Amino acid sequence: MSRKKKDKPVSSEPEYFGDQFDLVDEKDLLEEEDSKKRLDRQYFDRKRQQLAGMDYQKKITAHKRKIVRRIILAAAGVALLAGIILTVSYFTVYSSYKVVDTEKRTSGSGARYAEFYGKILRYSKDGATFYEKENKNVWNESYEMKEPIMDICGRYMVIAEENGTHVCVFDLNGKKSSFQVAMPIKKVQISEKGTLVLLMEQNDEHSLQYLDTQGTVIAEGKLAFEKSGYPLDISLSDDGFKLAVSYLQIKNGVPGTNMAFYSFASIGAAEIDNIVSNREYTGTVFPTVNYADDKRAVAFGDDRLAFFSGSQRPEMIKEIQVSEEIKSVFYNEKYAGIIVDSKDGMRMDVYDMDGKQILSRKIDFAYDRVKIAKDRIILYNDSQWCIYAMNGRQKLSPCKLSQPVSDIVALSSGRFILVMANKTEIVKLKR
């Protein structure tokens, strides 16, 4: 319903209503509001009638179904968003990086860096600092070591003096203990419980010590060369109960390996020298061994990879022969990788810890060093670096470095620490 406009006096004020607008009568508004209220009452009356015909259990079931539908819709929305993010991430290739933070250091300080529980660990001859990405210290601890070596597992970290006798154990809150041992240290490993193993050597005599977090010896033993061989590498399982040792052996002038597994649990106490399983290889040397978790380990040989599994008595589950020359090995808790010099050029092969190949691709980047970090394979030399994903896609095209780097540490899939001679840069990848 409309009505004729009244004449208005001429005014300089702008007119907000013109002939194209109809003014609504107040009576019409009231009638419309009453109609809406009637419709609302009719809707709720129908709902009450529906519910009145249900028993109590049916009402609960109907309510639960409504909640389930809402949860399914919400989950579908989250899954869709995650799928979009993963798709974008999958196809994104970065070509450069930007520096988001720089820390200058005194030349020759020899600081090294590692990712520790999502934050940054810096350690050197004088001490260790654990800090946030914005250089906010969580803790700072001092010590004096000529050549520190380090290992991390879970919430624990150990720094020991290579060819010295000093050991420091840390957790997320700082230093837990500091102690001296009787013989010079060659290698150190720590578990997620804070127990640790030291491989020590003095006057061509080797010894293993298994200690608690405070440095109390739990078990120890001498390693006779005539019996086992020369220890090349050690690796402690995450739970701290199993130790893999790769021994170099020479039999009839032929080099080989004795891969031995020790147990510090009750099952090992019943065995000679706590050895629960071992395997000998003639003609193959395994200089590197790595325990991935509580039960799986991998050994890198000069012509093969050997994968082991077992919660108490580890046994070999798969062996992969490699006919080409192995140039580099790299690994973390999930993957084991090698780069070989094939007849068609350099090739990168990556396996999971069950020995299943997940990646094989040719690379033409002239790298010096390679590592796995945050499910990314990082290759670098003094002037450039590049990154591959585990699906074989190149995530960072060969990119120029402002200075030679001694190490690259991953903070996330897109943020890294570039360790240089006189500074450290935290960088973010960009397209």
Image: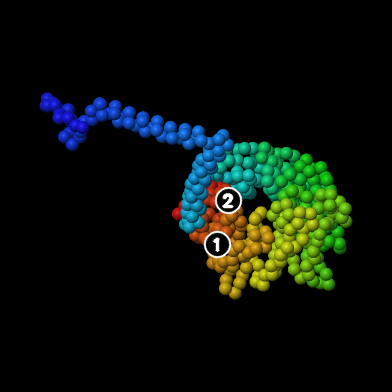
Which amino acid, mark 2? Ala
> Which quarter of the figure has residue 342?
bottom right
**Left or right: where does residue 152 sit relative to residue 411?**
right
Q: Quadrant of the N terminus?
A: top left
Question: Is residue 4 rendered to the left or right of residue 189?
Answer: left
x 25%, y 26%: residue: 26
In front: 335, or 253?
335
Q: How is the image coloured?
A: rainbow
Identity of the amino acid at label 1?
Gly
Q: x%, y% of residue 419? A: 58, 50
Label 1: element kind: loop
Q: Which of the numbered marks, if any, corresponds to residue 61?
A: none
The front one of 198 and 390 is: 390
Query: Nearest the camera: 319 or 285?
Result: 319
- Tell me the quarter of the picture where residue 254 sits: bottom right
At x 69%, y 41%, the residue is: 171
Read off the residue under disc 1.
Answer: 392
Residue at which label 2 appears: 410
For this view, does 4 lie left or right of residue 222? Answer: left
Give the quadrant of the C terminus: bottom left
Relative horizontal placement of residue 284, taking residue 49 as reference (left or right): right
Q: Position of residue 163 (x, y in %)?
A: 76, 51
Give whichever of discs 2 and 1 has the lower sequence position. Answer: 1
> Badge 2 local density, few (<14 within 10 Å), some, or many (20+)?
many
Q: Position of residue 154 (x, y in %)?
A: 68, 46
Q: Say if residue 34 shows up in the picture.
A: yes
Residue displayed at 62% across by 47% down: 115
